[in-house]
Image (cartoon, rainbow, N blue to C red):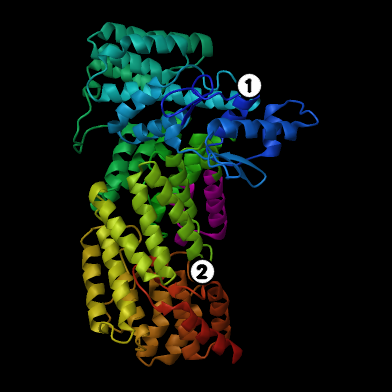
Amino acid sequence: MRIDVLGAVRALRDDGTPVDLGGPRHREVLARLVAAGGRMVSTDTLVDDLWAEPPVRAVGALRTFVAALRRAIEPDRPPRTPPRVLVTEGPGYALRLPRAQVDAHRFEDALARARRTPAALTDLDAALAAWRGPAYADVTGSLWARRERARLEELRLEGLELRARLLLDSGSGAELVAELGAHVTEHPWREPAWGLLARALHRAGRQADALATLRRARTMLVEQLGLDPGADLQRLEADILQGATTLLPARTVWTAGVRLGPRTTVELARTLALAGGDALVHSRRDRLAAVQAAERTGDVALTARVIGAYDVPALWSRADDPEQSRAVVAAAERTLTALGADGPAELRARLLATVAVESRSADLSGTERERAGQAAREAEALARELGDPALLVFALNGVFLQSFTRPGLAAARDATGAEILGLATRHELPNFAVLGRLIRLQSASALGDLYAAAAHARAAERLAVSTEASLVPVLTGWFRARATAARSAEPGGPSAATAAARYRAAEDALAGTASMPGLHRGLFALALLGLRLLHGRPAPTDPALDWGPYRPWAQPLVLLAQNRVEEARAALSAAPEPPLDHMQEALWCLTAHAAARLGEPPIAARAATALRPARTEHAGGATGMLTLGPVARYLTEAETCATQG
């Protein structure tokens, strides 16, 4: 069965025959549940949405409508068998249908795919052709329906314009002149539509008509709105007059040195970022330049789209370039302020998700961390309300990166990773499917479930082949080294030397990637320290080891290994609390171990307090790349020392 709401509300069986849904109220109940996108709608909300002034027996009437709809939708359901489509959930009802069986959801998903890749143009064509009239056309007078109708109509117009842009970018589009002419006549305030019509005319060899179209747009905007055309229309007019190469079909291979607009630049940067390595470094630089160029245009909506378009999956909680991240966050916050609380929900959600993703927890002050967490929650709430899977996985990426607020949250991160993976798999978002697998690998590693972590590693590697995610085998290589280190402490396991060699090979592979955010320095040294602690040996003292950002917490143990006890005590006292990132459990365990060795009860007590919520986890396991062994071992040491104070 499928349900259509892009026009009058209807339901069709698999053979195309219509389902008798009953009267207008029955169809409105079904439509309201469709609009919820699978989420539960409470009985109270349904009553308020159905009646401006609910009758005395409104709840009973609602239940009657639901019962009739269930009989219509599942006519063959045996008596006393729970419904599978229109289900009771908590204090209300929910519609459980795959998104592909609802035309509005198919349209939204096709539009989301087309935003990401031109190859999805065929799906977008089919989804646009499915519109039979205004959405929820026969649900009149309901506020919820008016809101949803307006939202979907805005997406339809965006879809029409995106389709035209993709065709023009591909080298065709001359045949769009009549279609776009009708579009701008019906929607004269949509500046992008005027630009598309001018491009189509130019593609058809009608340069004079293209310039006349832009002059008409200018006249209308100035005379009726008192506004000058935006920067995009002005630039297009100049390009047509000068015969600029930017009006030629888009090249399939990008060449350095070509001047691109901010929107094109950030889309290219997003594509390059997924390759990792040097491409990631360059893409982040170009992304910031695109943001700054967009801001200079003064077009708030353009700036918001440019900032929010860089939805590159992010796994690590330490930024590669904190200054650049802060600049992006500042631009996002300025744009949020300019949009205002009533600005388009999708743009606000993408900006908030950007704030959450770019505000890596290891680099934040307390106030910044609080704001980043708030942004993550708001982005998630907006994305769920909008029902956009691509937007939701981006928002959940921010939720994940803001989930390092204290030790012991591996299970919560696993739940986020599972939702990202499920959404990405169902809605064909392969890069986020990789992210979901890697989050689940890290979480299983933190929980000591190496079997599950290994399964996620294998699945991530299979996905990496099709997504060309070259960094995945680097990360899974580190995981296998971490697993070897854990087994080396078990009877009959591999030797510590074998584990050290695995870590060295993983480090060499990491160095070969040229760049990986937050993982340049210190990882190998920390992994060796963890391996030695697993075997009850002192810290490595090789002066050539690079401890990177982890030196303050490793230094006391290195000094102890050199019998420099008082220096070790001073280093322990000077060490700050570990940053709230992937390494926090590991660094607290180093603090606990050093405090116990040095007989420092107050420091041991602080470490014990921090580590108790992580009692069942493995130190360093949250990285999926190294291990110091069970947190419980270090917690016991710290608690024993603390009681001796």
Q: Position of residue 591 (x, y in %)?
A: 47, 80
Q: Looking at the image, which residue is at 28% across and 22% down?
A: 167
Q: Position of residue 122 (x, y in %)?
A: 30, 27
User: At label 2, which amino acid type do we have?
Assistant: Pro
Q: Position of residue 372 (x, y in %)?
A: 52, 52
Q: Secondary structure at mark 1?
A: loop
User: At label 1, which amino acid type do we have?
Assistant: Gly
Q: Toward the viewer: 194 or 144?
A: 144
Q: Main secondary structure of the magenta part?
A: helix
Q: Quadrant of residue 642?
A: bottom right
On screen, residue 242 versus residue 139, left or right, reads left
Cα–Cα span, label 1 and label 2? 55 Å
Camera-nearest label, 1 or 2: 1
On screen, residue 429 versus residue 504, left or right, reads right
How many other residues sit within 10 Å of disc 1, few (<14), some (14-19) or many (≥20)? few
Is any part of residue 248 visible from this angle?
Answer: yes
Above or below — where is 305 with respect to 556? above
Q: Which residue is mark 2?
A: 407
Q: Quadrant of residue 453?
A: bottom left
Number of the label disc, if any, that sits on residue 495: none
Q: Is residue 368 magenta?
A: yes
The magenta segment is: 354-380
Q: Which residue is mark 1?
A: 23
Q: Quadrant of the C terminus?
A: bottom right
